[in-house]
Amino acid sequence: MDKQSKPTSAAEAAQLAAARDEFVTQWGAIGNSWGINRTMAQIHALLIITPRALTTDEVMEDLKISRGNAHTNLRELVGWGLVRSVVRKGERKEYFEAEKEVWKMFCIIVRERKRREIRPAINVLKDCIERVDDLKSPEARSFAAQTKALSDFMEMADGVLSKVVRSEQSTIVPWALKFLK
Amino acid sequence: MDKQSKPTSAAEAAQLAAARDEFVTQWGAIGNSWGINRTMAQIHALLIITPRALTTDEVMEDLKISRGNAHTNLRELVGWGLVRSVVRKGERKEYFEAEKEVWKMFCIIVRERKRREIRPAINVLKDCIERVDDLKSPEARSFAAQTKALSDFMEMADGVLSKVVRSEQSTIVPWALKFLK
DNA sequence: TCGTATTTTCACAAAATACTGAAAATACGA
DNA sequence: TCGTATTTTCAGTATTTTGTGAAAATACGA
């Protein structure tokens, strides 16, 4: 091999590979701290930085994880809508590719967390409020007031997020940003 | 006991206690899904709906948890700034009370998560970008572009949250809300 | 239809995390 | 100073979560 003609080759490829690995690892740690399965976050990271779609086997090999693990977490990512499964004509294998546009990713995550976590929380709060609605004791009124405050806040937050996410494009937030202080 | 003069007594107290328990339990579950220790969230819930400050022993008894567990999680809550420890003159026991104002709670949580999770994530991304800054291959450029997009987005989000949280009062968001769609 | 490639499921194992109980340290009054 | 109340620490245990490997199911070509 002529080192002059391929200055990009070995060392640089290794450098890139190391950076990619670091990204995948760290993205896994970040996801983990936000309550997302570490492996799921790593697969997501891998698919984000891979231009082409990957098969389950490629994911397994790259992250050194088992088939079952890769499969479960790929399904979960598809369930969130962060990853699409694509089929190539004439091929039986299933390929996976991530949504790469950052704003869309954000919208998907916000929508899902709203649906899976914020809405249920609001329902629980409302239920608690109802359960003491007929009680007149000061303790009961105080409890109702506090849970009501939380419920109202979360409804408000839910509403803000709905609006932010509605347009599916990032222009609104930076624009609204100007008005904030 | 005269049932007429205390119509609020037994049954209603039980009803309130049940609602409080439900709230504590569910708040624990919610916190858990957001990556927060279940017990810590439950203690927080308990303190939020308790008008007076509680001792470690009272928390232990109410939630049926060990001293070590109660202690660790109370310290953690104090570390977040969500709970204050108060000392009553002439008493040796330490009492704990939660910040009850919802918007302040929100600000504290956002500030802490920004500091503990968003900033480190941004640093990792920036580090990844730097590591491939000198590489010219299309693969490297593509990787750099994708991580840059993520990094920029997170910086933007960090900035928005900073501004939202800066004032320590809730008037700004509802106001900005009008401009969103 | 059969044989093979691929996907899916699931019981169990491993790892990570949370909790306990009890001892050690500390604070304070007498 | 000693004795007691209170807080803190931490090694060990329990629980929960995550991952594995292998078998079962499915899809497809011949």
Image (spheres, coloured by chain):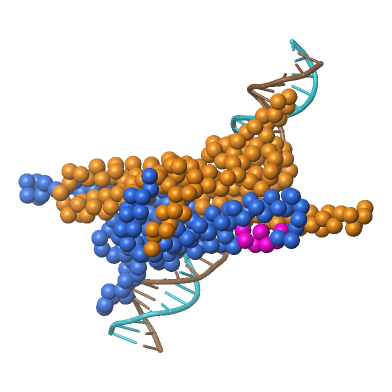
Chain colours: A orange, B blue, C cyan, D brown
Q: Is residue A128 left or right of residue A1?
A: left
Measuring from the top left, give residue B125's x and y in whole percent: 61, 58
Which residue of the protein is positioned furthest toward the right in this rendering?
A1
Name the one closer to the observer, B126 or B94. Answer: B126
Q: Is residue C29 left or right of residue A57?
A: left
Name the one closer to the observer, A37 or D10. Answer: A37
The residue depicted at 39 percent of the width and 58 percent of the height is A179
Inspect this view and state whether residue A14 appears.
no
Q: Is residue A87 magenta?
A: no
Q: Is residue A149 left or right of residue D21?
A: left
The residue depicted at 59 percent of the width and 39 percent of the height is A83
Query: In terms of image quadrants, where is residue B110?
Result: bottom left
Query: In terms of image quadrants, where is residue D1?
Result: bottom left
Q: Which residues are magenta?
A: B125-132
Measuring from the top left, give residue A6's x and y in whole percent: 87, 54
Measuring from the top left, give residue A124's x and y in whole percent: 33, 43
Name the one closer to the observer, B41 or B150. Answer: B150
The residue depicted at 83 percent of the width and 54 percent of the height is A9
The residue depicted at 79 percent of the width and 57 percent of the height is A12
- Number of labelled discs? 0
Check the picture and name the quadrant holding the C terminus of chain B.
top left
Inspect this view and state whether residue B6 appears.
yes
Q: Is residue B130 magenta?
A: yes
Q: Main secondary structure of the magenta part?
A: helix
Measuring from the top left, give residue A161's x and y in whole percent: 41, 47
